[in-house]
Image: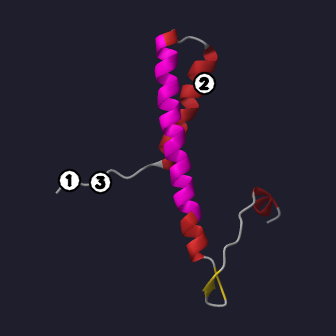
């Protein structure tokens, strides 16, 4: 039985950051830049999908009076803690 490889959000985000830095340095040829851009788009989509799944899971876990209550997440909520 083949095991399914789990998605590592932090690893993908780090790869994306490295790609951006390399592209900003301007050392890539046109072909290398296109390949890096394509990889960056792929990583971005994977990260967005993982974040969406995490958000859905958080919404499912938040309950109020025994019923599901969706509470929007805002970054400023963390700053106030």
The answer to which quarter of the image holds residue 19 is: top right
Task: Report whether residue 15 is seen.
Answer: no
Residue drawn at (42%, 50%), measured in percent from left and top? 7
Residue 62 image offset from top left, x and y in percent: 62, 77
Dot 3 lies on which element? loop
Residue located beneath label 3 in the image: 4
Q: Are marks 3 and 1 in contact (CB under 8 Å)?
A: yes
Query: Position of 71 compared to 50: left or right?
Result: right
- Quadrant showing the C terminus: bottom right
40 shown above or below 7: above
Q: Which residues are magenta?
A: 31-55
Q: Residue at x 49, y 41 (%)?
A: 12
Q: Which residue is mark 1?
A: 2
Q: Marks 2 and 3, how far apart in space?
A: 31 Å
Name the secondary structure under disc 2. helix
- Give the label, 1 or 2, closer to the camera: 1
Please name the residue that numbered disc 2 is placed on.
21
What is the number of the mark on residue 79? none
Name which residue lies at 66% across and 73% down: 70
Q: Nearer the viewer, residue 17 or 37?
A: 37
Q: Give the mark, 1 or 2, whose residue is nearer the N terminus.
A: 1
Q: Secondary structure at mark 1?
A: loop
In this view, 69 is above or below 32: below
């Amino acid at each position: 039985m083949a095991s399914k490889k789990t998605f590592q959000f932090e690893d993908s985000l780090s790869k994306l950051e490295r790609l951006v830095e390399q592209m900003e340095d301007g050392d890539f040829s046109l072909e290398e830049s296109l390949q890096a851009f394509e990889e960056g788009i792929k990583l971005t989509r994977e990260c967005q999908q993982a974040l969406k799944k995490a958000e859905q899971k958080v919404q499912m876990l938040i309950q109020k009076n025994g019923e599901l209550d969706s509470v929007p997440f805002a970054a400023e909520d963390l700053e106030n803690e």
